[in-house]
Image (spheres, rainbow, N blue to C red):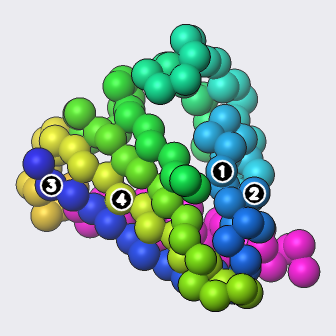
């Protein structure tokens, strides 16, 4: 099973970075594109959350149905302190590619992760 990973340092204390990205149902907080809906079925570990998008400190999620070229996708976003003023995000995912090679799928997901980090950086910059 291929695995994509991104590690990025932010000039933001760990608690502030977690406050920005830690709510799975509120991707709009960091992406600038709020979810049209976040529906949760069940409670706790194993709960199914369905996000519909318009266009420790760790979140794990699975994509169970999607038009994206992947199956059996499971990802984790983890935040860790670097020092008092900065923190690190590790965003990784494992998956089975659909209709593309392992290398193409890894590149596809790494591009998506980098796009997400770019949106996070823009949000942080707007906050001043």
Answer few, some or many: residues within 10 Å of disc 1's Cα (few below 14, many 20 plus, some between 14 and 19). many
Disc with the residue nearer the chain's start (3 vs 1): 3
Outermost residue toward the top?
Answer: 42
The label on residue 22 is 1
Residue at the spot of label 2: 19
- 63 to 33, vertically: above or below: above
Q: Nearer the viewer, residue 60 or 100?
A: 60
Q: CA distance from mark 4 to mark 3?
A: 11 Å
Q: Is residue 99 left or right of residue 20?
A: left
Going from N to C along the chain, the mark reached first, 4 or 1, is 1
Q: Is residue 8 left or right of residue 11?
A: left
Report the Cα–Cα distance between label 1 and label 2: 6 Å
Q: CA distance from mark 2 to mark 4?
A: 19 Å
Q: Position of residue 52 (x, y in %)?
A: 60, 29
Residue shown at 75% from the left, 57% from the top: 19
Tell me the magenta residue range. 106-128
Of the numbered discs 2 and 4, the one sitting upstream in the chain is 2
Q: Pinpoint residue 71: horizontal percent, then vertical percent.
A: 23, 33
Query: Which residue is denoted by mark 4 in the rendering?
Result: 92
- 4 or 3: tag closer to the N-terminus: 3
Discs 3/1, front: 1
Q: Residues within 10 Å of mark 3 (few under 14, many from 20)?
A: few
Quadrant position of residue 98: top left
């Amino acid at each position: 099973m291929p695995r994509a990973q991104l590690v990025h340092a932010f000039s933001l204390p760990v608690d502030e970075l977690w406050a920005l990205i830690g709510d799975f149902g509120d991707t709009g907080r960091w992406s600038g594109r709020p979810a049209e809906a976040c529906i949760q079925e069940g409670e706790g570990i194993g709960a199914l959350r369905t996000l519909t998008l318009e266009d420790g400190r760790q979140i794990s999620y699975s994509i169970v149905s999607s038009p994206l070229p992947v199956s059996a996708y499971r990802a984790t976003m983890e935040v860790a302190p670097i020092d008092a003023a900065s923190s690190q995000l590790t965003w990784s995912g494992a998956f089975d590619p659909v209709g593309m090679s392992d290398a193409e799928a890894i590149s596809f997901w790494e591009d998506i992760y980098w796009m997400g980090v770019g949106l996070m950086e823009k949000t942080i910059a707007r906050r001043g």
